[in-house]
Amino acid sequence: MLYAILCYASEDVVCSWSKEQDDAVLAKLAAVQEKYARAGKLGPVARLLPTTAATTLRKVKGEPVVLDGPFAETKEQFLGFYTVDCADLDEAITFARELSEVNPSGGSYEIRPISLLNPVAATI
Amino acid sequence: MTDVAWISAAIGAARPQAVAALLRYFRDLDMAEEAFQEACLRALKAWPKNGPPRDPAAWLIFVGRNSGIDQVRRRARQAPMPGEDLLSDLGDAEADMAERLDGAHYRDDILRLLFICCHPDLPQTQQIALALRIVSGLSVKQIARAFVVSEAAMEQRITRAKARIADAGVLFETPGAVERAERLAAVAAMAYLVFNEGYSSAGAEASARAPLAEEAIRLVRLLLRLFPAEPEIMGLAALMLLQHARAPARFDADGALVLLEDQDRSLWRGEMIDEGLALVDKALRHGKPGPYQVQAAIAALHARAKRPEETDWREIDLLYALLERLQPSPVVTLNRAVAVAKLHGPEAALAMIEPLEERLSGYFHFHGLRGGLLMQMGRAGEARVAFDRAIALANTAAEAAHIRQHIDRLMREGTAGYPVPTAG
């Protein structure tokens, strides 16, 4: 069974860590991941870059509209995610638009740059 | 990390919102700061025991407001301050408080706090010092170190700035759309000043000033959360991130400036570049170009080039031409000349910068670039004169060291191909 572990915390606080504090946290997290990676159980681990870098594609009256900023509604639930390597934001928006066109739910797609914390170490 | 380090980070993150709200309550900067300090002291006692509150800013505003009111009463009636037991049921009050926090005021509160720091009566050095003290919460000692002045002198500078603000009075009514846009532009310019103070330093100063660039990035991210659809704020954030991403590669082991095209690109911080590129793309989709966006787009083209040879100089030249129209300045033309040299050779670039001589005769980079172009054209004697001028005008030891390397090369090889300096 594959699980996603979704991390929630205050972006304000995490962004105010010094580089040393941040490195220290990541090192401790890496040590935990290491154990699962060795057992062949760990998939890609990503850090989402700040919400200020996010763009959201949502359907307004059935038409996809691109909005600045992260997805902010609480009436919808987090149902899935894709990781995709795009040359620029336009390409990522095109991908999200294609997804939204074939998706009958009126949902939204938040487009957020990520950085992989274990680019080569993923073991699944 | 200790509890104290975590709590400090949480307090630091909440600071702009908390001080801004307290300023609205008390309409006095010193009082708002005192109330916030008091709230922080109580947080340091209460949070390790009870765990951090769900909304640190709301907690600090609530406690700070109460302690400020106590102060006012005490001064008025010399009555004793209520003991901490009166604050013991904060846990319950906090949830309430978070609901009642006036969300509509939040944005203008923070903008006002930031705007106070860039009052037009204040010289730039005071604006920066005030923003770092009040908004970022750096200590007077840290700021004094960054500006290489004594703590007493910096204390005086900040006190003077506050006195000027108090004289000028602060506008508390909710700003209209035009006023808000003006405030935002002034605050953005101030944030960029803070960034440049950090970015332009080198050597011994660099370690004291490096936090300024980080603080500026925090400020601009804060602005962007308040105004998520402003393309110029996206542009400014991107510009800072893309420039700061190169910081680890900008100086060599001896502290000399390393030209953009000689930098080890593997040292650039990928995460910051990705964030910056996403922001540039977001901004440009609005189709409302402004100076920060254009500069960020230029920085993005450098960041996208895996190797210096892959740099899209044609596009950079076009962007500088656009920047010349948006924000005419001889320095912009000077930068454009670098792209022109790459595209059309040193003669064309030299012809472009010669008319700037009168206005830029006291500018380090003018003579550095001119020397470089002359060197490429084989005019070694003139190049040497230009380099000497540049060294005399260098602002930092790193700049001087960088030019000296070129003079050494000139002496050694005669007309070695001089890489045209691009702002690292």
Image: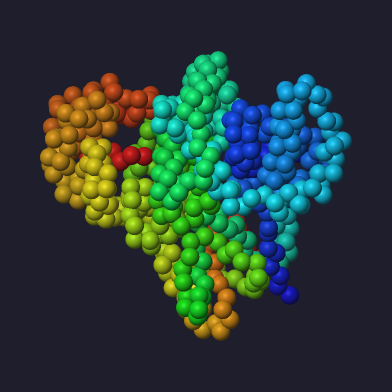
Residue occupying the point 23% across, 23% down: B389
Residue that lies at the very extreme toward the front in this rendered image: B77
When the figure is inspected, residue A74 is found, relative to residue B81, above or below; the finding is: below
Q: Give the image location of residue B259, x and y in percent.
A: 34, 39
Q: Give the image location of residue B226, x and y in percent.
A: 53, 51
Residue occupying the point 56% across, 43% down: B109
Q: Give the image location of residue A79, x and y in percent.
A: 64, 73
When the figure is inspected, residue A103 is found, relative to residue B291, above or below; the finding is: below
Residue occupying the point 70% across, 32% down: B68
Residue that lies at the very extreme toward the right in this rendered image: B85
Question: Which quarter of the rendered picture does the C terminus of chain B lie within?
Answer: top left
Q: Is residue B25 visible?
A: yes
Residue occupying the point 70% across, 64% down: A5
In this rendered view, identify the residue nearer to me: B169 or B165.
B169
Q: Give the image location of residue B114, x and y in percent.
A: 51, 38
Q: Quadrant of residue B382?
A: top left
When the figure is inspected, residue B54 is found, relative to residue B197, above or below; the finding is: below
Q: Quadrant of residue A77?
A: bottom right
When the figure is inspected, residue B320 is found, relative to residue B156, above or below; the finding is: below
In this picture, residue B4 sits left or right of residue B405: right
In this picture, residue B263 sits left or right of residue B315: right
In this picture, residue B284 sits left or right of residue B51: left
Question: Which quarter of the rendered picture does the N terminus of chain B lie within?
Answer: top right
Q: Is residue A29 visible?
A: no
In this rendered view, identify the residue nearer to me: B159 or A93.
B159
In this rendered view, identify the residue nearer to me: A39 or A69.
A69
